[in-house]
Image (spheres, rainbow, N blue to C red):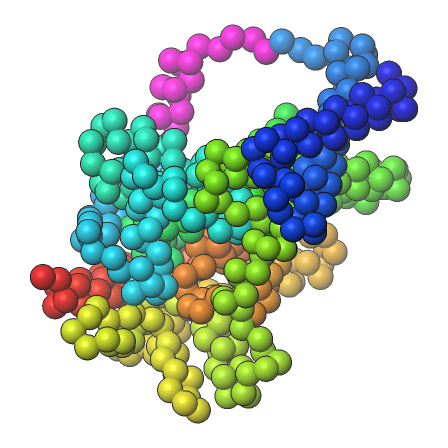
């Protein structure tokens, strides 16, 4: 089919469908003019691109003739083979599922609203959003474009088993945490062909403060982390069919937390970058087209699903409308309007959180906001003129020193490899993802630790990939095992502090 007919067959139906949908389901005519324009223009462009791509591919008989019908596979044999090959990873994930569930049952207490008390987490409201019968009527802010579509089906399914929406939300959350551990084990094992190294790296992620806490405390962030790790798994595949998996997992990332799609984009750009060769220019042009296709498909489908989501759940905001984006202003931190001591303190806190608190828990501050109420726990304290981040003492100081050695060694090996080969691998994407999170949260968010699962996987994977040349080295494996043992002890005391805090203020 020629280009102009494809254009008409795509553009006109797209405009008509979006107008009708907005008119009847989104109250188009009653919105501000700017919102009307964006509400019509962006979804129309998205649907037009999808229809145009569809007609381009399926309107060509040659493309249809090249489609192959996949053979039926014996599912039972595949499942048995998968379980046998990944038995160690499954056992590890089940162990973390038990740990996360134990912590989750103690911290996510029903009928007591502790929103913002635990490192700014909204665990009480997200318990309702995921599985409560009326949870879909709660406000859903723009940064979570279609989180209800992704999370509530799991909550409903779990309700059938538990008949307890509070327990259902906790189990859905802890299962996501355990899944992130298993996928990490699977990723590292496939990449480096060493089960011991995979076991150690997956344990490091599972024992990190970020995953121990948010794998247990109901929020969106463990789901974001799981989607991000799933995207890296999809990138790991070198088969042509992997595009569908990368686009699908990036769509999940997009729907749960919009800004995390930037990390998917970085990962795709770095992982698919062509190697130099005699036809490098042609390969580079194909690469640019593929990157555009990946981004355009994800964003287009994401915009359309967001509209359906807002129609199904009217309390949801559309991320691409200015009227919805204004609400995020209260979480902004303007480094140009704050005093110097506060900006320096913020930068110091963010560096500590990203590189240290994410992995090793310090002692949090417990601050009483209202007499007789529940204290607010954070990894920093602000008094006029002083910005005080949490500190380490005793065993934790030794752990910080060892972790700093791992980080330094990983950074050194990464730079040496990059300088020698002048070729970027996925490790660069992990480093860039950590950097992007630093820049984002320099100006957004109150408690940086709240967002730590968004970069914990990238930090751990950067270390794992950079140290991979020594993956089979028994000294490194022994050092990692000792570090993990002491880390588990430190994290145990951190949660003991949290539990004791809860007991003291629970009626």
Question: Could you say which quadrant of the image residue 499 lies in?
Answer: bottom left
**Residue drawn where x is 79% and y is 37% of the image:** 289
Q: Nearer the viewer, residue 272 or 325?
A: 325
Question: Could you say which quadrant of the image residue 19 lies in?
Answer: top right
**Residue drawn where x is 54% and y is 73% of the image:** 333
Q: Does the stretch in magenta take in 168? A: no
* Horizontal side, residue 360 vs residue 425: left or right: left
The spot of residue 303 in percent (x, y) is 62, 39
The spot of residue 349 in percent (x, y) is 45, 75
Question: Could you say which quadrant of the image residue 402 lies in?
Answer: bottom left
Q: Does residue 101 show up? A: yes
* Horizontal side, residue 341 vs residue 372: left or right: right
Which range is magenta?
A: 70-86
Q: Main secondary structure of the magenta part?
A: helix
The spot of residue 44 in percent (x, y) is 72, 35
Q: Does residue 38 show up? A: no
Furthest-left residue in this view: 507
Q: Nearer the viewer, residue 221 or 492?
A: 221
**Residue drawn where x is 75% and y is 11% of the image:** 64
* Horizontal side, residue 467 vs residue 425: left or right: left
Vertical comparison of 479 with 165: above or below? below
Q: Nearer the viewer, residue 7 or 96?
A: 7
The spot of residue 100 in percent (x, y) is 26, 48
* Horizontal side, residue 214 vs residue 28: left or right: left
Furthest-bottom residue in this view: 385
- Total count of labels: 0
Q: Does the stretch in magenta take in 76? A: yes
**Residue drawn where x is 19% and y is 51% of the image:** 111
């Amino acid at each position: 089919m020629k280009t102009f007919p494809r254009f008409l067959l795509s553009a006109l139906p797209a405009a008509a469908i979006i107008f009708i949908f907005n008119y009847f389901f989104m109250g188009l005519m009653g919105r501000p003019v700017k919102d009307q324009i964006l509400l019509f223009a962006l979804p129309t462009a998205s649907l037009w691109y999808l229809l145009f791509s569809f007609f381009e591919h399926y309107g060509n008989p040659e493309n249809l003739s090249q489609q192959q019908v996949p053979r039926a596979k014996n599912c039972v044999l595949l499942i048995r083979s998968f379980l046998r090959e990944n038995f160690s990873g499954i056992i590890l994930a089940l162990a973390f599922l038990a740990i996360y569930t134990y912590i989750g049952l103690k911290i996510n207490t029903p009928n007591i609203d502790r929103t913002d008390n635990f490192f700014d987490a909204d665990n009480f409201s997200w318990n309702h959003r995921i599985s409560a019968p009326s949870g879909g009527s709660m406000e859903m802010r723009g940064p979570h474009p279609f989180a209800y579509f992704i999370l509530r089906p799991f909550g409903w399914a779990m309700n059938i088993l538990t008949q307890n929406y509070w327990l259902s939300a906790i189990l859905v959350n802890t299962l996501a945490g355990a899944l992130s551990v298993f996928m990490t084990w699977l990723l590292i094992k496939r990449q480096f062909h060493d089960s011991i190294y995979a076991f150690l790296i997956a344990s490091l992620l599972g024992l990190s403060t970020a995953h121990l806490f948010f794998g247990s405390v109901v929020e969106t962030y463990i789901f974001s982390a799981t989607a991000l790790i799933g995207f890296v798994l999809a990138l790991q595949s070198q088969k042509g069919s992997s595009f569908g998996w990368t686009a699908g997992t990036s769509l999940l990332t997009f729907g749960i937390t919009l800004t995390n799609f930037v990390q998917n984009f970085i990962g795709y750009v770095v992982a698919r970058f062509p190697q130099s060769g005699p036809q490098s220019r042609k390969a580079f042009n194909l690469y640019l087209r593929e990157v555009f296709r990946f981004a355009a498909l994800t964003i287009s489908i994401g915009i359309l699903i967001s509209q359906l989501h807002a129609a199904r759940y009217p309390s949801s905001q559309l991320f691409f409308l200015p009227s919805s984006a204004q609400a995020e202003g209260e979480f902004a931190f303007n480094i140009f309007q704050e005093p110097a001591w506060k900006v320096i303190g913020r930068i110091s806190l963010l560096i500590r959180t990203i590189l240290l608190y994410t992995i090793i828990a310090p002692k949090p501050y417990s601050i009483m906001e209202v007499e007789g109420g529940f204290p607010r726990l954070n990894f920093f304290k602000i008094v006029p003129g002083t910005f005080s981040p949490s500190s380490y003492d005793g065993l934790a100081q030794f752990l910080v020193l060892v972790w700093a050695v791992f980080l330094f060694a990983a950074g050194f090996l990464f730079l040496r490899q990059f300088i020698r080969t002048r070729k970027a691998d996925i490790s660069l994407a992990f480093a860039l993802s950590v950097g992007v999170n630093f820049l984002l949260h320099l100006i957004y968010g109150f408690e940086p630790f709240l967002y730590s699962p968004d970069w914990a996987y990238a930090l751990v994977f950067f270390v794992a990939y950079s140290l991979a040349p020594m993956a089979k080295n028994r000294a490194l494996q022994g050092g990692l095992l000792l570090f993990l043992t002491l880390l588990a002890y430190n994290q145990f005391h951190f949660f003991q502090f949290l539990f004791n805090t809860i007991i003291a203020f629970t009626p």
